[in-house]
Image (cartoon, rainbow, N blue to C red):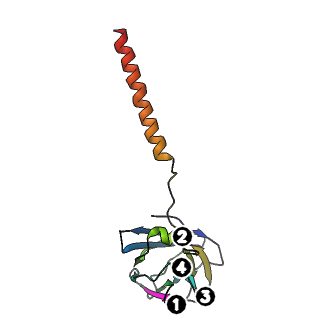
Amino acid sequence: MAGVATCVRAQGLVASGIVSGSGSGPYTYDLVFSNGVSATQPIRAIWYAGTTNSYYLPSTPISVFAPAGWNAALSGNGTQSSIQFTVNSGTSFIAAGSSLSGFGFQANFTPSELAAAPNGGLSWANSGSFFNGLSERFTVTGPAAPEPGAPILLVCGGAGLWLASHIRANELRGRS
């Protein structure tokens, strides 16, 4: 599953993100976060699927990981959780017009359960540490689902072309 985030623009940050899940249990979820070209501040902290005293993941992940220069930590109340990513190197922030991959987690919940979780992608980006600096709320969404009828149309179109060529070939044989 892969998808594009929607974002709410705030002072200095234009955050967005993508989540993709793979596996058959436990599932591995990869996150990519971006800061738009019009941003005036870098992103130095991201609170994925949560906010103060609110945790939106369906259950607590087994493990969390972050790219070099970042830390990852679980935050939660024992039954629900979220993930906090913070920069630990002055040069590892997400600058304007840049993206950074390597964030993620492993969990027992399925991609469908993640997609169905109320507010499951609601996240915060910060220009400083949490509760320090500019912040922006944004939603990391799941997959951009393909049009369900597209594969059916492709098969029907192919079958129609085969049938037309078959009829045409029989007509040509009948004239000889």
Most foreground residue, 43 or 168: 168
**Front-lying residue, 125 or 24:** 24
Q: CA distance from mark 4 to mark 1?
A: 13 Å
How far is mark 3 from mark 2, CA to CA? 31 Å
Q: Residue at x 51, y 58 (%)?
A: 145
CA gap, disc 4 and disc 2: 13 Å
- Per the model, the C-alpha gap separating discs 1 and 3 is 26 Å
Q: Residues within 10 Å of mark 3 (few under 14, many from 20)?
A: some
Which element is circle 1 on?
loop
Residue 113 x, y percent position in the rendering? 49, 71
> Which residue is label 4 attached to?
49
Q: Cβ–Cβ below 8 Å for labels 4 and 2?
A: no
> What residue did someone put label 2 on?
116
Pointers 1 and 3 in contact (C-beta within 8 Å) = no
Badge 2 amino acid:
Ala
Q: Which residue is mark 3?
A: 133
Residue sticking out furthest to the top: 176
- Residue 13 visible in image: no
